[in-house]
Image (spheres, grey):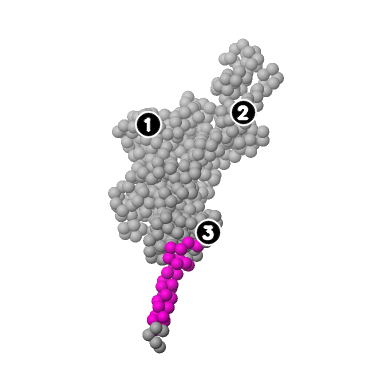
Amino acid sequence: MSRITKRIFVTFALLLLAAAFTGCGSGNKEGATPAGADEVGGVAKVDEALCIGCHSSWAEPLSGDPIVANYQASVHALNSVGCQDCHGGGAMHNGVGPIPYPNPNHEQCARCHNSDGLVTAYTESKHYNVVIEESSVCNRCHTHQGAVLGAKAGFTGDGEALDTTLASLAPGDLTAGTGEPIKCNTCHVTHKPEQLRVDTTWAPSTMVGSVSNTGNNQYKLCTQCHTYINPAGVLAGSGTTTPNGLVTVEVGHHNTSWYRAIPTTHYDNPATTSVVEGYVLRTNGTNPCFDCHNHESKTNTRTAGTTLAGTTLADATIYSDWSQSGHAGGLLTIKYEAAAPYSRSVEQVNAVMDAGVDEAAGAAWVHYNWDQTTGTNNRATCQRCHTSTGASNYLTNPTTYDPTNNDFSHLSGWTAATGSNQNELLYCWGCHSNAGKGVVRNPGAFTASYMFNGTAAVFPDVAESNTCITCHTGLESGESLDSIADFSNASFKNSHYMAAAGLMYVK
C-alpha cells in the first residue's frame, strides 16, 4: 500500500469514528439544525429521536421515575412539546456535552404556562418562598426533596407519621440544610406533569365524621403536607380531644399553631347542628382544593403580633376578607375571638377548632336545615341563596334550575329527605365558576321571584353584578308590603332583610 493510500485510509477511518461518537447528539454535523427546528436557550435543536435513543433507560435520580416512558405518555408528547422545548437545544450536547437547561425550573415552565399568571402566582406564593428548615423532619414539607421522597415513601405530614416513618427513608435523603424550595415538579411528576405526585397507596375508606374519600389526587397531593386527616381518617389538629369531642392527631409539629391546622377552619362538626365550625371540603368532587384556591397558597389566617391571637391581619388576602364577611358568617372573626384568651398552645388550637358560626352570628346559614331538599318542611326553594350548591347551580342556568337536582353528598350523612347535620356557608365556588382565577358566574338578566301589581320584577344584565342581584332582590315588594299593618306579626311576608338590588333599581 502506498504512503498516499495509507493516508487516505487512515483519514477515512477517523471520519467514521468521529461520526460514531457524534451520532448520539445529532443526526447532522455539529451545530446543524434539522429542517423546521428552531433554537431554545440559544442552541439549535436536533432530532428528538436522538434524545430518546440515549435516555430511554434513564430514571430521575430522586424519585426513580422513568424519564422517557413518562414523557411519551404525557400531555407534552401528545401536544408535540419535545425534550428540547424544556431543556434547550441539543446541538452541543452529544450525550455528554453542555445543554442550556439540564434541570429546567419555573422560568422554563413560564415560557408556556404563564399566560394566565400561573407561574407569577407561584413565584409570589409561600410555596416558592418556603422557609427551608434545618431539620430533616421539617424538610418533609419544607423542601422539594422532602416532599418528593415523602410522597414516594407513603407518609403524610401528621406528627406521628413523621416521627415513625422518617427512619424508613435512606440515610441522608432528608438531610438538614440540603433541600431546595418547593418547585413545579415537587407537585407535578417531572416528565408527566399532568400526573400529580401523590402516595397512590393512601386511600382511607372514611373521613372522620364526613363522607367517603374517593382518593381524589388533588386532595391527596395538597394534604400530604397541609394535613387534614391521617391515613386512618382521623382529623389533624392538636393531637388531643377538643371540648366538643373531636378526636385529633398532631398536625406535623405545628400542634400549637391553629392557623397551620387545616381542620380548624375547614371542618364542620356534624355533632353540633346549630354551629358551623368551618368550610366543608367537596372531597368527592373534581377540585376539592381548587374549588377556592389556586397555586398561590396564601390564605393568611395568621395575624400580626407575637401572640398570634389578635384580629389584625399582617397581610389581608381575598380568603381572609371572605372568611370575615357575612357570606361566611364572620367565621374568621369568630375564630380570632376564640383564640384570644390563650397563648399559642394545644388549648388554643382546640378552642379555635370548636368555635363557629351560630344563630346570632349567621342565621342565614344555621337557622334551618337548608340542604334538606324533599320531605316535610324542606328548604328546597331557599337553597339557591342559602347554600353554595344551590347558588352555583342556579347561577349557572337560572332557567333550567331545579332544586331537586341539588346534590349535597359531600355533606356528612346527607340524603335529600333528611339533609345533613353539616351546613354550607356561601363558599367561593358558589359565586365563582373558577375561584382561583376569579371567574364569576353570570346568570344574565334576572326575573325576581316576587310580584308587584301582578308583574314580576325584571333586572337587567349588568354583568357580574347579576351574581349578587339574584339573592339580594328581596322576597316581597311594593303593595304586598304596603298591605302589612303590623310587621311584628307578618310571619314570613317580608322584604327578606338584604334587598339591596330591589332598592337600587326601585323594583
Q: Is residue 483 above or below residue 189?
A: above
Nearest to viewer (mark 3 / mark 2): 3
Q: Is residue 115 above or below residue 145?
A: above
Chain-order first, disc 2 or disc 1? 1
- Residue 461 is tagged as 2
Q: Estimate the spatial distance between the alpha carbons at disc 1 and disc 3, rounded to whole Å.
A: 54 Å
Circles 2 and 1, Cβ within 8 Å, touching? The answer is no
Q: Amino acid at mark 1?
A: Leu
Circles 3 and 2, Cβ within 8 Å, touching? The answer is no
Nearest to viewer (mark 1 / mark 3): 3
Quadrant of the rendered structure where residue 369 is? top right
User: Does the image show residue 179?
Assistant: yes
Residue neighbourhood size for the residue with mark 3, other residues' Cα within 10 Å, grouped as few (<14), some (14–19), many (≥20): few
Secondary structure of the residue carrying numbered label 3: loop
Secondary structure of the residue carrying numbered label 1: loop
- Residue 313 is tagged as 1
In the image, residue 9 lies in the stretch drawn in magenta: yes
Q: Is residue 236 above or below residue 39?
A: above
Q: Amino acid at mark 3?
A: Gly
In the image, 464: left or right of 151?
A: right
Picture quarter with the N terminus = bottom left
In the image, residue 43 lies in the stretch drawn in magenta: no
Residue 360 x, y percent position in the rendering? 47, 24
Residue at label 3? Answer: 36
Quadrant of the rendered structure where residue 57 is? bottom left
Chain-order first, disc 3 or disc 2? 3
Q: Which residues are magenta?
A: 6-34
